[in-house]
Image (tube, coloured by chain):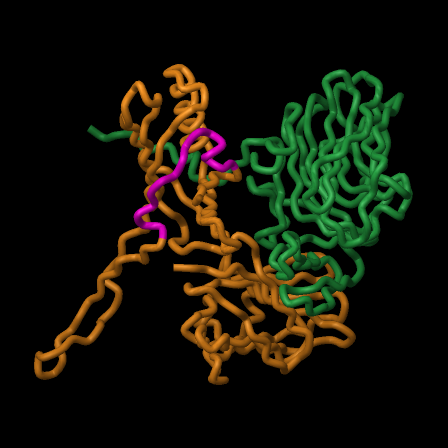
Chain colours: A green, B orange
Amino acid sequence: MTLPVQDLGLVERRSRIAFHWAAHRHSLISIDGRVPTHTRPATAAPGDSSGVARTVVAHQPAWDNIDWDGDATRDTPALLLGPNDKIFWAYPQVPRLLTAYLEFVENGTLAIASAALLYFGNAGNTGARLWTDSTGSFYRVRHHNGTTEVTSTLAAAPTSGQRVVLRAVLFADGSVQLHQSINGAAETSAAASGANTLAAAWSDTRLYLGTTGDTNPGNVKVVRARIALGNRSAAQMQVSW
Amino acid sequence: MADLSIIGTPVSSLGWWIELVPDARRTLATAHQTLPTQYGRGALVGGLAGFKPRVLTFRGGVIDPANTTTALVTAIERLKDLIENSGLLTLKWDDGTAFLREIDALPVELLFEPSGHPFAAVKETLSASFLTMPESDWRALAGSSVALAAAATRYQVPLGTAPSPAIIRIQAVGSNAVNPVVTIRDAAGVAQITLTFTVTLVAGEDFLDIDCERGVLELSDNGVRSNANSLLTGGSEDFPFALQPAWGDREGGFWPTVEVSAGQGEVLYAKRYR
């Protein structure tokens, strides 16, 4: 008797949350193999593991090794996204209860009003979309359903070079709330917004880091981005894929 | 307390407390073909006859704070789901130091056995075995990078205890880089790998990826990527390769070096450990 061939579908790497990308392997590809579109028609100047600066040319990912854990060793790779970078992955999810988690090093985005960190939506920054950006002084999360927008704005802000974790929650009623941890300290939270009816779909199935599509670039060193369905705690988002 | 994370989730958070990892630091067992010497009193190594893939077994108690059979069964089901349904797993090993390592693996067996006196704790012992693939060496959790900030200059690449495939990326900054040659030398300065490319990299626009992780050569021409195999006109027999710790002197802190004859570049890699 010939036995059927074993199903090897689970040999591939998988992510069990909606999206997970991390810089630690120097790859733009997400944990489960999604290949992004990345452009940067300009040079950039990241640092290596020893802190030596180098120039990288157009469209070359700028991997910047940073000291994330405060032990004076630049052992954590981060992706430097400056004013000329644009990167997005496919994100085939509809608006629903979710938690968006972003770890990064503050590098100038905060001082630029409307500069974005993480954005679901289309290239034109229109229609139904969800994003975290800066007021120019504080970070906030914004949910626009195509007609109405609600926001949740923090009251504390990091300084340049600090390690930041932002945890944004989109609730089932369309309200949003932003939580922030700086340099590993306990989270502080902004007040949740009012409700805002969820649209049937985002304006495009794209997830951007560092811009709102083609506009509002920031300047940030991104270590990790995770999107999980449900309202997940900081502890869950730190460890769960 | 040593802990294991599976695709990012510490197993202790699911009630599995690792107590024993008998083979975490064990190196691969290899077998060599041997030939007799001319007078039959010795052996010459004729090649690698084979090796056993690395199988890691983690053993520890499974318990739930509720200390009930129902809670224990729930904990077991969560562990089975995480381990059996997550595809190619990344295992992270944390032994309480800053020396975090990870390895990719497939689960091959989960063995649950009753453990302890039922009045003391509702507990079972889980022995989980994983076949590491495609690599058998541990990888530093965080990648490293070395800037090749100037042409014709040797830059040291610190390694772990196992060979590390790397991405060497060459680009032209300021002026075009014509026909770059990449040379890997041992700590004594002897060339071990020499790759010659016939290409002009346009300043500020082009870069060349020598990707030994994936075994591909790619040219990025102002953002448009293409196969660059035909550009490698010397040393193709050595590609792809891994940077060898044996080319350095770990005790002395000297490492193999990478240099490019024209342009600048970077080396992106993760240290590997036996």
Vertical position of residue B208 compared to residue B110: above or below: below
Residue pushed farthest left? B40
Question: Which sits in the foreground, B83 or B171?
Answer: B83
Res. B68 image quadrant? top left
Q: Residue at x 46, y 64 (%)?
A: B160
Vertical position of residue B122 compared to residue A64: above or below: above
Q: Residue at x 45, y 49 (%)?
A: B95
Res. B238 image quadrant? bottom left
Question: Which sits in the foreground, B152 or A69?
Answer: A69
**Quadrant location, the C terminus of chain A:** top right
Is there any visible trace of residue A120 in the rendered image?
no
Q: Position of residue B61 (x, y in %)?
A: 35, 32
**Quadrant location, the N terminus of chain A:** top left
Q: In screen coordinates, is B11 left or right of A183? A: left
Q: Position of residue B178 (x, y in %)?
A: 67, 78
Q: Position of residue B170 (x, y in %)?
A: 64, 69
Q: Position of residue A181 (x, y in %)?
A: 72, 40
Q: Residue at x 80, y 43 (%)?
A: A211
Q: In screen coordinates, is B226 left or right of A220? A: left
Q: Is residue B18 magenta?
A: yes
Start-end of magenta stretch: B9-24
